[in-house]
Image: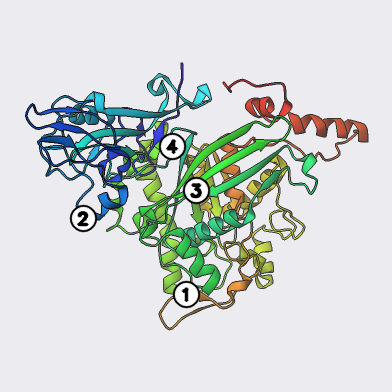
């Protein structure tokens, strides 16, 4: 039996089936039109094809107007002011009284227009059985074709877009149902760098192109290649493309996040395994929630509106601003303002403990979580070397070492996780305690959305924060949290030790053999894809 993936709405997180998705009549596109025969005396209609003309007699042919003429008539293409003209395919049924707009399921369209006038447009999907169920059996419904009689013409219209019944009838991605969907929530306190991070992530993903892993200059040595394509439609009040353009072209930093919640950053992930040619794809939605929802009591009611969604998210990204850490090692710019910002961490912590954790089983958040220390450039300013060292944060730490290169393997992410956690543990005990108490599957990273080297900023005449030299913006490791999340979600395989290091008593041949084994044994499904000789669906 055929199956498809849950059709997930990134706004309300409802998982739709073929029977619950809705179609918007306003999206209908005319795909064919032909004249029908009208016998005035008998009021019978006979389909005579489209190559006829109207004679002006009591009976004759309705001429078929061209598509251009049809749209130039000025009315809606669902015009209902036509005589009752029965059709050859639908007895005593015309466009009179039929809706010209609205959102309807397939069954509702059949009830309105007649089942014989509705054709379901379906797609065969090859699925991983572990990611679907009986509720999603059959081929994937991707559109409908509707037939009606209008102005003496038999017209067929196609509708492709599918909508959720939440909010203002949100449109879902065309890829939904064809590939697995994952919704990630990006959250943090006010001014923790979420929006700048998201813009830099978008910029890095759209410019980077293909990732090979493990990283190598020799394509023959790569296990797989990874592509991330951004699919966002740019319909937010201030969409991610506009924010990114302002930042990278003009150095304008974004306002506090408010409008980004209108549209998630949507990406399609493609992984191709080189040895077998197998391809794994996934649809990824990043939702950004304003920090004010966590730290402003007047805004927390907005967060409560989506509280029931938290157990349904597939993962979380949480940003932490070093300037809000309890043990500050950076000079205060405004003591009162800095005190307020440090208080935000406490407020954020309380929201997690009192509002979010209780929605989860056993008060534990088990989804993969990227705990991200933002504004990492602050840790590379030599002015603070002594203060950081006194807190147990050494520049010899791999996370901060100059020699560190971007990678994908387990040792790399282990070092990132250890280093970032040590920084949080030393500087913000309340955050480390929060993560230990309520997060079962968290990993820690550090990024700098602008550059590893400090960048000068100023306030422009318009009151906006600006970067002095936009060309100096060079994001540092902003893709690490995303790539690790992809591994945790099993979209890409979590690589074992591909850069095998010498072990005590191990000779070169043993080390090379261990490296070869580790390159192939990744995880169960990854091994099936990478090792070859496997052509079936994953289980």
* Callout 2: SS: loop
Task: Work out how far the residue at label 2 is from the one at label 3, CA to CA, in angstroms.
Answer: 50 Å
Placement of 506 over or under 373, stated as above or below: above
Q: Nearer the viewer, residue 241 or 411?
A: 241
- Quick one: label 4 or label 2, which is nearer the N terminus? 2
Considering the numbered disc 3 on the image, is that residue within a helix, a strand or a loop? strand
Q: Is residue 271 above or below residue 531?
A: below
* Label 1 – label 2 distance at C-alpha: 48 Å
- Look at discs 4 and 2 and give the one toward the viewer: 2
The mark closer to the camera, 2 or 3, is 2
Q: Nearer the viewer, residue 143 or 205?
A: 143
Q: Which residue is mark 2?
A: 74
Q: CA distance from mark 3 to mark 1?
A: 25 Å
Mark in the foreground, 1 or 4: 4
Q: Which residue is mark 3?
A: 317
- Give the residue drawn at x 73%, y 42%: 214
Q: Where residue 488 sits: x, y (%)?
A: 57, 37
Reading the image, the residue beneath label 1 is 465
Task: Identify the mark nearer the N-term, 2 or 3.
Answer: 2
Disc on the earlier residue, 1 or 4: 4
């Amino acid at each position: 039996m055929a199956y498809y993936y849950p059709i997930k709405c990134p706004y309300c997180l409802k998982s739709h089936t073929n029977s619950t998705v809705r179609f918007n009549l306003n999206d209908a596109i005319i795909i064919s039109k032909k004249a029908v025969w009208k016998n005035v005396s008998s009021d019978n209609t006979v389909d005579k094809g489209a190559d006829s003309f109207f004679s002006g007699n009591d009976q004759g042919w309705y001429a078929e107007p061209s598509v251009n003429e049809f749209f130039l008539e000025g009315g809606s293409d669902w015009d209902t002011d036509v005589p009752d003209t029965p059709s050859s395919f639908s007895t005593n049924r015309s466009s009179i009284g039929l809706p010209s707009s609205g959102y309807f399921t397939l069954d509702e369209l059949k009830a309105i227009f007649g089942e014989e006038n509705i054709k379901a447009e379906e797609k065969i999907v090859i699925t991983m059985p572990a990611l679907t169920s009986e509720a999603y059996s059959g081929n994937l419904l991707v559109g409908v074709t509707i037939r009606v009689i209008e102005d003496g013409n038999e017209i067929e219209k196609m509708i492709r877009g599918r909508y959720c019944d939440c909010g203002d009838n949100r449109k879902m991605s065309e890829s939904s149902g064809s590939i697995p969907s994952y919704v990630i929530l990006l959250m943090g306190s006010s001014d923790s760098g979420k929006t700048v991070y998201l813009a830099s992530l978008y910029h890095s993903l759209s410019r980077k192109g293909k990732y090979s892993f493990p990283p190598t200059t020799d394509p023959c040595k790569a296990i797989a290649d990874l592509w991330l394509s951004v699919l966002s439609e740019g319909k937010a009040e201030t969409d991610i493309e506009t924010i990114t353009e302002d930042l990278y072209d003009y150095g304008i930093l974004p306002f506090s996040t408010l409008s980004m919640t209108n549209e998630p950053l949507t990406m399609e992930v493609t992984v191709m395994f080189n040895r077998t040619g197998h391809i794994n794809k996934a649809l990824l939605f990043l939702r950004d929630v304003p920090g004010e929802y966590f730290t402003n009591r007047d805004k927390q009611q907005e967060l409560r509106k989506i509280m029931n969604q938290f157990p349904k998210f597939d993962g979380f990204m949480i940003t932490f601003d070093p300037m809000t850490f309890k043990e500050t090692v950076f000079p205060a710019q405004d003591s009162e303002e800095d005190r307020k910002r440090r208080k935000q961490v406490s407020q954020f912590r309380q929201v997690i403990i009192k509002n979010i954790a209780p929605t989860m089983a056993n008060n534990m958040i088990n989804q993969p979580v990227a705990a991200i220390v933002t504004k990492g450039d602050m840790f590379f300013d030599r002015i603070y070397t002594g203060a950081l060292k006194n807190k147990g944060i050494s520049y010899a730490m791999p996370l901060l070492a100059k020699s560190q290169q971007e990678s994908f393997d387990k040792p790399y992410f282990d070092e990132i996780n250890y280093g970032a956690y040590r920084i949080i543990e030393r500087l913000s005990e309340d955050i480390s305690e929060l993560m230990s108490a309520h997060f079962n599957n968290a990993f820690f990273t550090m990024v700098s959305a602008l550059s590893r080297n400090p960048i000068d900023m100023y306030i422009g005449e318009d009151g906006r924060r600006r970067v002095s030299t936009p060309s100096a913006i060079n994001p540092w490791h902003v893709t690490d949290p995303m790539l690790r999340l992809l591994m945790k979600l099993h979209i890409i395989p979590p690589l074992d030790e591909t850069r095998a290091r010498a072990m005590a008593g191990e000779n070169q041949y043993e080390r090379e053999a261990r490296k070869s084994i580790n390159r192939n044994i990744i995880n169960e499904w990854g091994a099936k894809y990478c090792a070859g000789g496997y052509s079936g669906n994953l289980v």
